[in-house]
């Protein structure tokens, strides 16, 4: 999927070996989508854009509800969808920031898959329950606590809850009040706070033990969530 960031003049496009045609000028934010089984060629002037590569294996793992329906996906050109554009922009910002949170990326990827799928297969089934059972929710929470320092995956958490990632994200939020990515971030912040209160470990080591990429990552998110840097927080509780 491509999100064009610049104004584009008319563009020449050819799908597979078919005839070429010209699509009209495109305003910034216009999207195009090409499914993995289709070859799309175009003559496009130099422009800024965001390109999101469709990983068929990842999509199948995150959204098994789609099944074989992805084979029916067709190219979508000159598409206007503010939500798809925002998802792609957020993904790009996460990657460019150097701190791409795996759960957030997988959550956004799932949302992107769902949004695109609804254009081809209609409305996908939503969870029938009002959330996770207390037992399954506790299993997920216990796993998160035991693996905060690891690169946690939405797919793994969903498997522990015996749900697909698509249903798990919604059910977890219904049961706990926050989404899985937000919950994990909150627990990592609390783990970092506890380590700063109870130990004299360096902030770099605390960042690693709490599941952040590095000290810079810890500082950035800690300041955003608490309004102060880790160093200042440590000074206030010393």
Image (cartoon, rainbow, N blue to C red):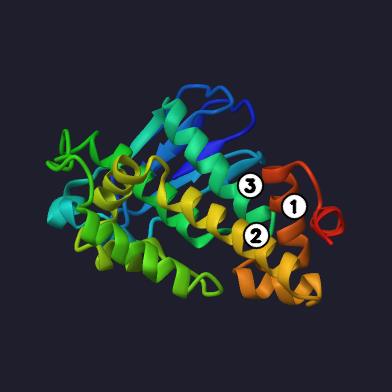
Q: Is residue 156 above or below residue 4?
A: below
- Whether tag 1 and tag 2 are in contact, CB under 8 A, the answer is yes
Tag shown at residue 99: 2
Which of discs 3 and 2 lies nearer the camera? The answer is 2
What residue sits right under mark 3 in the picture? Answer: 93
Label 3 sits on a secondary structure element that is: helix
Identified at 47% across, 52% down, the residue is 183
> Horizontal and vertical percent for residue 184?
49, 57
Residue 204, by quadrant, is bottom right
Residue 135, by quadrant, is bottom left
Mark 1 packing: few (<14 Cα in 10 Å), some, or many (20+)?
Answer: some
Frontmost residue, 214 versus 10: 214
The answer to whether residue 57 of the structure is visible from this angle is: no
Identified at 23% across, 54% down, the residue is 134
> Horizontal and vertical percent for residue 224?
71, 44
Dot placed on the residue nearer the N-terminal end, 1 or 2: 2
Label 1 sits on a secondary structure element that is: helix
Cα distance in 3D space between marks 3 and 1: 14 Å
Quadrant in which the C terminus is drawn = bottom right
> Horizontal and vertical percent for residue 26?
53, 24
- Whether tag 3 and tag 1 are in contact, CB under 8 A, the answer is no
Dot placed on the residue nearer the N-terminal end, 3 or 1: 3
Q: Is residue 96 above or below residue 224?
A: below
What residue sits right under mark 1 in the picture? Answer: 220
Label 2 sits on a secondary structure element that is: loop
Mark 2 packing: few (<14 Cα in 10 Å), some, or many (20+)?
Answer: some
Frontmost residue, 118 versus 174: 174
Identified at 50% across, 28% down, the residue is 30
């Amino acid at each position: 999927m491509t999100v064009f960031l610049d104004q584009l003049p008319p563009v020449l496009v050819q799908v597979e070996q078919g005839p070429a045609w010209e699509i009209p000028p495109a305003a910034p934010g216009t999207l195009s989508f090409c499914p993995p089984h289709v070859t799309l060629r175009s003559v496009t002037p130099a422009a800024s854009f965001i390109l999101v590569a469709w990983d068929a294996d990842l999509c199948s793992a995150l959204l098994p509800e789609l099944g074989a329906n992805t084979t029916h996906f067709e190219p979508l050109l000159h598409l206007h969808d503010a939500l798809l554009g925002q998802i792609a922009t957020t993904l790009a910002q996460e990657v460019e920031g150097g701190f791409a949170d795996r759960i957030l990326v997988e959550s956004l990827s799932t949302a992107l898959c769902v949004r695109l799928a609804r254009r081809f297969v209609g409305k996908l089934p939503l969870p029938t329950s009002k959330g996770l059972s207390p037992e399954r929710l506790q299993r997920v929470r216990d796993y998160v606590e035991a693996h905060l320092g690891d690169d946690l995956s939405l797919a793994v958490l969903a498997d522990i809850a015996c749900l697909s990632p698509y249903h798990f994200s919604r059910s977890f939020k219904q049961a706990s009040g926050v989404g899985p990515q937000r919950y994990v971030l909150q627990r990592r912040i609390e783990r970092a706070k506890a380590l700063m209160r109870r130990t004299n470990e360096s902030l770099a080591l605390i960042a690693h033990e709490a599941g952040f990429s590095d000290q810079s990552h810890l500082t950035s998110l800690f300041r955003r969530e608490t309004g102060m840097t880790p160093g200042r927080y440590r000074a206030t509780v010393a």
